[in-house]
Image: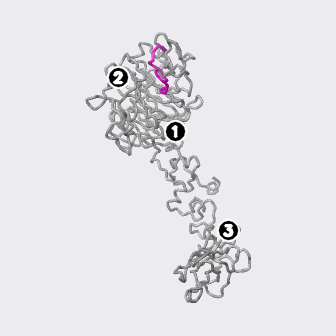
């Protein structure tokens, strides 16, 4: 259990498309991690996810399994690591970010607590040139920050849309920020920092808000944070969302518009929207940026806000632009949308994201985002990774990279029979679509297509009151040992704007042939073959079979526009609804003992 307290066609058919809501589930992706605290993927890499363990390992999920060898191990040398980090409490390997050009340069960055000193270190590593699943061990430190206490290390790293590396730092620890570090622009603690990792040390972008000699420090981008353990960027807008852990009363979610610097989020004077009453503070100042959402710890066993991500994936329709966040102690999960300064669609997600049965989600240490924009939940205590999916799973039957439910919601696909499957997938898997319009026949009929004989086939496919044309009888093998074969296309309809033709293949090339027809079937021997049409018969004009210009073979083809004959009115019986017609091709074959060739026959009924 969680640790939580008390189209016109469709309109004509009068069909309804199911309302694709935002009902979700947490799908277990992988188990077997030790205290996972972060998950990410290299830009564009849809085959791997990298999971950061607090003990110092970065492990890869690949092909549905965890690679046996860690990508990088900064932990205890006795356990095969590089001995770089100090662990325990809130210390350890805490964050990771891939360079935007990782595919070219192989650079990635980590945030860890240094062994011995307890300082925060932000350093660069590079993937091995020999193995993309193994990192090199050469470290380039970018930033070292002395920590006065063991807690409030924060630890998040992320690249913004501007290509700069953003780093979150806590206020230095203890309680109530005793050194007032978060408001002190001469300290890097309690801040969002911004570095340009593509220029030489000290990596200071010249457009940082406090660039200049002395204090404030050049690295600072924003101030007034207590312990922003997890922050993220909206990959579409570039806006930053920050989960800032409160003291003893209030947790908060902060917002930073893309490109906006110099904001002050209020700590230690403000805890959420509440005044702390600490000395030296002016509460509710217009110079302070209030959270977009806060909640009290006492309201549900909460203790630590875990910032998440804005959903930009394709598996869950209706969630675009939705921000997810959680609480570590209660494992509560919420979502909201934030647009033009207004929070909307606030939703408690705890129950629907509780896995059915076992295992369960108990301590949410972080969210993660893969290269496709799908969001993951990390269970710190149980070492599990879950993905946020639509309830019932995510199907992509048409393999367009978008979940079927999203195709239906955004109108890319239709679902005329309301079975939750795009119509094109129904048709592709065998649902009848006789007129090949991409819509199941049953939906065409429900939308008004005629089906006079109520056999489930639109009359446009078989003609109103008629039956589909069918072939019968036996063709006569010709002198080239081919079986001349008859076929029809369309419907013998009296209606305008329809077509019906009768053709023959496997005909001796460059020979005359013609179609003859009557009004009853036959099966009498005739000149070495079978006369399949009963007398009296009517002949159509002869035509040349064409085909290969030289030699003798079966490449000839005959074709006759029977619809034109129907429409001409020259044969009144052909304008009689329900009239049976039988037709067969005759053609020349000089090498045959009787010098003729005969196809099999086709039978059809004149229809509306």
Label 2 to label 3: alpha-carbon separation: 80 Å
On screen, residue 294 versus residue 330, left or right, reads right
Per the image, the residue denoted by label 1 is 312
User: Residue at point 56% right, 54% down?
Assistant: 415
Quarter in which the N terminus is drawn: top left
| Tag shown at residue 498 | 3
Choose between 172 and 350: the one closer to the eye: 172
Q: Nearer the viewer's eye, disc 2 or disc 1?
A: 2
Residue 96, picture quadrant: top left
Q: Can you give x and y, in whole percent of width and height, for residue 267 in the image?
A: 48, 18
Q: Position of residue 379 (x, y in %)?
A: 37, 35
* Residue at 60% from the left image edge and 66% from the top image edge: 458
**Mark 1 residue element:** loop
Comparing labels 2 and 3, the label whose residue is closer to the camera: 2
- Write the start and end of the magenta stretch as one range: 184-201
| Res 380 seen here | no
Q: Earlier in the sequence, mark 1 or mark 3?
A: 1
Viewer-proximal residue, 555 or 61? 555
Which of these two is toward me, 394 or 16? 394
Q: Residue 476 colored magenta?
A: no
């Amino acid at each position: 259990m969680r640790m939580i307290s008390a189209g016109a066609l469709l309109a004509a058919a009068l069909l309804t498309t199911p309302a694709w809501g935002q009902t979700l589930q947490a799908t277990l992706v992988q188990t077997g991690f030790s205290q996972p605290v972060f998950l990410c993927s290299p830009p564009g890499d849809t085959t791997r996810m990298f999971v950061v363990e607090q003990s110092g390992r970065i492990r890869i999920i690949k092909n549905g399994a965890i690679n046996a060898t860690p990508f990088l191990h900064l932990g205890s040398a006795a356990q095969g690591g590089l001995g770089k980090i100090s662990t325990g409490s809130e210390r350890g390997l805490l964050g990771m970010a891939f360079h935007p050009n990782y595919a070219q340069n192989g650079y990635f960055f980590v945030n860890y607590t240094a062994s011995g000193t307890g300082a925060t270190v932000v350093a660069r590593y590079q993937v091995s040139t020999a193995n993309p699943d193994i990192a090199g061990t050469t470290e380039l430190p970018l930033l070292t920050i002395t920590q006065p206490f063991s807690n409030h290390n924060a630890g998040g790293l992320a690249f913004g849309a501007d290509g700069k590396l953003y780093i979150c730092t806590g206020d230095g620890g203890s309680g109530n920020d005793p050194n007032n570090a978060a408001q002190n622009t001469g300290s890097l603690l309690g801040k969002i920092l911004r570095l340009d990792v593509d220029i030489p040390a000290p990596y200071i972008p010249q457009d940082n808000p406090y660039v200049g000699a002395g204090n404030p420090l050049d690295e600072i981008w924003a101030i007034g944070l207590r312990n922003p353990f997890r922050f993220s960027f909206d990959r579409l807008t570039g806006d930053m969302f920050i989960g800032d852990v409160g003291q003893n009363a209030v947790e908060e979610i902060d917002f930073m518009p893309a490109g906006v610097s110099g904001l002050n989020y209020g700590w230690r004077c403000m805890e959420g929207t509440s005044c702390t009453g600490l000395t030296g503070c002016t509460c509710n100042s217009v110079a302070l940026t209030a959270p977009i959402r806060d909640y009290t710890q006492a309201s549900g066993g909460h203790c630590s806000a875990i910032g998440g991500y804005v959903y930009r994936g394709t598996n869950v329709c209706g969630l675009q632009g939705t921000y997810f966040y959680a609480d570590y102690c209660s494992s509560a999960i919420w979502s909201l949308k934030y647009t033009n300064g207004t929070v909307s669609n606030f939703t408690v997600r705890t129950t629907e994201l509780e896995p059915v049965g076992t295992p369960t989600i108990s301590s949410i240490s972080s969210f993660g985002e893969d290269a496709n924009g799908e969001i993951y939940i990390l269970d710190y205590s149980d070492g599990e990774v879950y993905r946020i999916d639509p309830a019932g799973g995510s199907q992509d039957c048409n393999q367009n990279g978008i979940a079927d439910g999203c195709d239906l919601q955004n109108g890319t696909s239709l679902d005329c029979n309301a079975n939750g499957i795009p119509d094109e997938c129904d048709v592709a898997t065998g649902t009848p679509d006789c007129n090949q319009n991409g819509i199941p026949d049953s939906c065409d009929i429900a939308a008004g297509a005629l089906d006079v004989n109520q056999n489930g086939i639109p009359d446009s496919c078989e003609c109103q009151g008629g039956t589909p044309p069918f072939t019968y009888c036996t063709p006569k093998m010709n002198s080239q040992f081919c079986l001349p074969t008859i076929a029809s296309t369309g419907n013998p309809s009296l209606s305008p704007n329809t077509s019906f033709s009768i053709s023959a293949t496997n005909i001796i090339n460059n020979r005359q042939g013609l179609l003859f027809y009557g009004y009853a079937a036959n099966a009498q021997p005739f000149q070495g073959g079978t006369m399949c049409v009963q007398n009296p018969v009517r002949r159509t004009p002869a035509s040349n079979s064409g085909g290969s210009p030289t030699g003798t073979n079966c490449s000839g083809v005959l074709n006759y526009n029977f619809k034109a004959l129907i429409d001409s009115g020259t044969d009144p019986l052909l304008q009689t609804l329900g009239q049976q017609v039988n037709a067969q091709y005759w053609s020349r074959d000089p090498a045959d003992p009787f010098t003729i060739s005969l196809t099999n026959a086709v039978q059809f009924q004149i229809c509306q």
